[in-house]
Amino acid sequence: MKKQLQDFKKIFNGEFNIDSLHTMLYATDASVYRKIPLAVAYPTSERGINQLVNFASNNNISLIPRTAGTSLAGQCVGEGIIVDVSKHFTNIISVNTEMKTVTLQPGVIRDELNQYLKSYGLFFGPNTSTSNRCMIGGMVGNNSSGTTSIQYGTTRDKVLKLKTILSDGSEVIFEPLTKEEFQAKTNLNSLEGEIYKKLYKALSPKEVQKEIRKEFPKPEIHRRNTGYAVDSLINTSVFGDFEDKINICNLLCGSEGTLAFTTEITLQLEPLPPIHTAMIATHYQSLDSCLNDVVVTMQHNLHTCEMMDDVILSCTNNNKTYEPYRFFVKDNPKAILLLELKSNSEEDLQNQVNSLLASLKNSNYSYHNPVLRGDEITMALELRKAGLGLLGNMVGDRKAVACIEDTAVALEDLPAYIKEFSALMKKYNQQAVYYAHAGAGELHLRPILNLKKDEGVQYFRKITTEVALLCKKYNGSFSGEHGDGIVRAEFIPLMIGEKNYDLLKKVKKAFDPQNTFNPGKIVDALKMDESLRYEVNRVEPKIETLMDFSDSEGILRLSEKCNGSGDCRKSAEAAGAMCPSYHATKNEKDTTRARANALREVLTNNKAVNKFNSEDLKKVFDLCLSCKACANECPSNVDISTAKAEFLYQYNKENGVSFSNKLFGKSTQLNRLVSKFPKISNWIFSNNLTSSFIKNIGGVHPNRSLPLISTKGLSKTVELSLKEKNKKILIQKEVFLFVDEFSNYLDTDIAVDSFVLLSRLGYKVNIIDTLDSGRALLSKGFLEEAKKEVDKNINKLKGKISATTPLIGIEPSAILSFRDEYLRLATDKTSATNISKHSYLIEEFLASEFERGNISSSMFTSEEKHIKIHSHCHQKSLSNQKVTFDILNIPENFKPTIITSGCCGMAGSFGYEKEHYDMSMQIGELKLFPAVRKTTEETIISANGTSCRHQIFDGTGRKALHPVTILKNALK
C-alpha cells in the first residue's frame, strides 16, 4: 500500500502526507479514541476530493472527512485517509439578501461567517461552544445546535442545499424536491438515481413509517441525532398526505460524513438578533424546583435557557479572577437558570421581562431573580463557562469522559429523567454535575473515569449502557447534538429498534455500497470501549526532566491534559493570542493541540533511551513562538512553551546545539561584552558590510535589523537624572527595580525612565542591575545554565523581597519568569515561591498604587494624547493587558486604546532567525502592523516588550515607546 500512496501523492491536487508526524497528529480528535490513519490529505479543489474518492474506491480504503476535528464522539478518527478541508475549502461563495441565504464551502468558521454576514443584516443561528473555530461542514456533519436552538433550531433546520461527491465520484446536488421531481430522480441511470429509488422503496411501506414514529425519539425533541434522520423524510409529500417538499439534506445533516462528501453548503439565514437584551438569573434551593420552572419559563419567547448547578458555581468560589463575575449570585443556590430575552424595542423588552418575572413569582419555585443587562450578561455566561473549564481541568489520569453528555428528553420528562439519572450516578459513585441546555431538555454530564485502567473502561461501558436504557425509557435522544460517532453508535439498535437499525444499514448501502465514507460510525459500529487513546493497563513510562512538572504529575501528563477541544485552532480574527503559528499557516501541525498530541505519542511510544530524541518532536515544536498564550487560553492550561524548553534541553543533549542557537541563547554574555565598547559595537551592527557578515554567521535574516547597544551606562545616567530633578519628594514605599539584561544593555533609557518615574512618584528605588533573568537561555533549552542563573537570583533576592518591598520589573518576559519558570527550576522553592508572590510588572505595580490612591492624575500633564497599546504575550498570559491601559489612563486627557492583536511575531530570537523571519513578519501582518499603520503620526504607539518594539519598527517604521517612558514624559 505504501507504493500506491506514494504514487498517488505525485498526482494529487493538494497536499498528501504519509509521514509519521501527520498520521499521529490526526489519530485523535476531541474524543477518547485513537486510530492511526494511512495518510492525511488536504485537497485544494473538488478535483482533489474526486481523486481521493476514486483512489479509495479502487484500493478499498476509507475516507474520513474532517474540518476542525473537535468531535467528542470519535467521528473524525479512522484507519483510512483523513481528508482535512479546513485549510483550502474556506470560501464564502455568495449571499442572497432577498432569499436570506448564503452558499459557502465546508471549511468556513461559524463566527467568521457571522462576522461577514453582519453587514448584510443577517446571521446563521446555530452556535456551538466551539463557534470561534468549528466549521460549517462539521456543523452539518453533526447537526449542531448550541445555546440558541430553542430560538433558531438546529443546523438541519437551516440547510437548504448540499453539493456533494458520491462514493462513485459523481457530483450531485441535494435540495428540496416536489413529489414529481423526486419521482423523476428515481428514473436516473446513476448512483443518484439508485439512491432515490432505494430510499423510496425502503420508506414507502406504512409499517416502516409506523415503526419509525414508534421508536424514534419524541418529535418535540428537536435535538435528535440518533442514527440517520429518516424520520425527517416521512412527513413529506413523497411519503404521505403532507405539503412539505422532501429534502435529502435532512438525511445528510447529522450523517457524520458517512453518506457523501460535501463540497458546498447553502444555508437559510436569519435577520440579526434584536439589539436589546436582558437576562434573568433565577435562583433555586433545589434541583427539582429549577427543573419544574423550566417548563414555566419556556412558555416565554426565550433566546437562551441555560442551567448551572452549585458544583459549577463552587468551582469559581474564592477564585480571584472570577469572584467579580459572581456579583449576581445570592446565598448558595443549588441551581441557577440563565434566561435571556431580546427585542428591538426597549419598551417591549421590559414588558417581556415583567411578564417572565410575573410567571416566576406565580410558580414560586425560585427565591431570587436578578435582571442582568449589558456586560452583566456576558459576565454571567462567562461565569458558567469558567466553572465548566475549571471543572474539566483535572490533573492526573482520572478525566471527565464524553459518553453520556449528550442526552435530550422532552421538557415535561426532564425532572423525572434527572431524578433517575442522579440515582444512577450515585450508584457508580459519580458526582452528578448539571449544566444543560435546559430549555431544549438536554443534559450535559461527564463521568470522571480513568480509562488507562480496566476498571475505568468497564465503568465506561456500564454507565453508558445504563444511561442509554434510561434515555430510551423516556423516548429521548441519546445523541442530542454531539453525534453518535464511535461512543454512541453501538447503542443505536437499542435506541431505535432493530428494524429501524436495519433500515439505516439500507440507507448507508444505497449511498455508499463499498463502505468508503467514514466506516464504523452510525451503522456497523465499532466497539465503544476499544481503540481508546490509551492502552489499557499499560505501564506508563516515567519521564525524567530537569524542570519540575509536578503540578501536572510530570511532562507526559501535561501533554495528556489536552483533550483535543481545539481552542488553539481559532483564527487571528478571534480574541486572544493562541496560537500565532497556526494563525499564519492554518496547519494542524502548528497548533498547541498538535504539539501536545505529538509529545504524548512520542514520550509514550519512542523506544529510545532519551525519549525526547525525536525528529517528529523537533518538527512540531519548530514554529512554536513560546508566546505562552496556551498556558492561559487553553482551557486545560497546556503550557507548550515550557514543554518546548524541556524538549530543546533534552534533544540538544543528544544532538548538540547549532552556533546560531548558542549565539541567541547566550546573547546576554555577548551583550555584556560589547557594551564595554557601545559606539564601536553599534557601528559594526549597523554598517551594511559588517552587519551582513554577523547576520550570515549568526543565522539572522538579511532583512532583519540588529539590536543596538545602549550608549549610556545606567548608574551615571541615573545620577544625572536625579541632579536634574532635585525636588524634595515624600518617600511612601521602598521597591526593588529589577533592571534585566535587556533593559540593562539594550534599553538603558527605559530603565532610567522607570527609575525616574518611580522616584518622582515618591518611591525609594533600589536598583538591581547585575542579574540575568535567564530568558534567552530558557528559550534555547540551556536549562542547566538557566538553573544556575535562577538559583543565583533567588539567593540574591531572598530576604529582600516582600509584601512591603516588592520586586518591580520592566521587561515582561524577564520579570514574569519569577512567576513561571523559576518555580520549576529553583533549588530553593520556598524562597522562589515567596519572591514570585511579590514580583510585579511595573504596570501592575503602578496600577495597584493608583487604585490605592498613592498616585493621582494631578501628578501628570493635562495635555491630550492618543495612545495605541500593544502588550507583550507573556503579559497577556501571566498578567493582563488592563494594567497597561489603566496606567496610561492616569493622565486625565490621555486616551489609550488596546490594539486587539495577538503575538507580534518576533518572540525573542524567533523573528531574527533566517528560517523563521518570513513567518514572523506574516504573523505581524495579521493584525498588529495594519493597526499601527492606520494610526496618525501624532498617535503614540505603546509596547512594553523589547522584541515587540523591534518588530513594530522593522514592520512599520514606527518607533514604539514603553508605557513607562510615556508616563515619565507626562510628569509635571
Image (cartoon, helix red, strand yellow):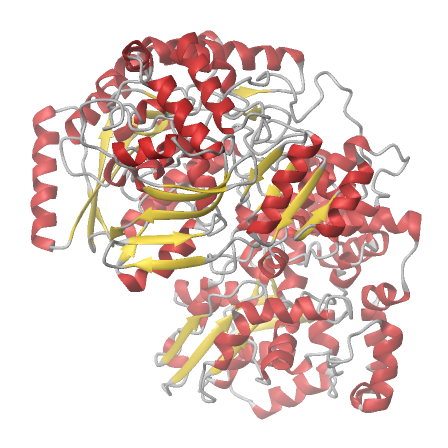
If the image is split into quadrants, where does the N terminus sit?
Answer: top right
Vertical arrangement, residue 210 with respect to residue 546, above or below: above
Q: How many callouts does the rendering have?
A: 0
Left/right of residue 455 with respect to residue 745 in the rendered view: left
**What residue do we see at 53% from left, 46% from top?**
567
Closer-to-camera residue (792/88): 88
Q: Residue at x 72, y 35 (%)?
A: 38
Residue 36: in sight, yes or no?
no
Residues 121 and 676: in front is 121
Residue 73 showing in the rendered view: yes
Residue for point 60% across, 15% down: 456
Residue 234, by quadrant, is top left
From this view, report whether residue 731 is shown above or below residue 103. below
Q: Residue at x 63, y 20 (%)?
A: 451
Residue 807, image quadrant: bottom right
Considering the image in quadrants, where does the C terminus appear?
A: bottom left
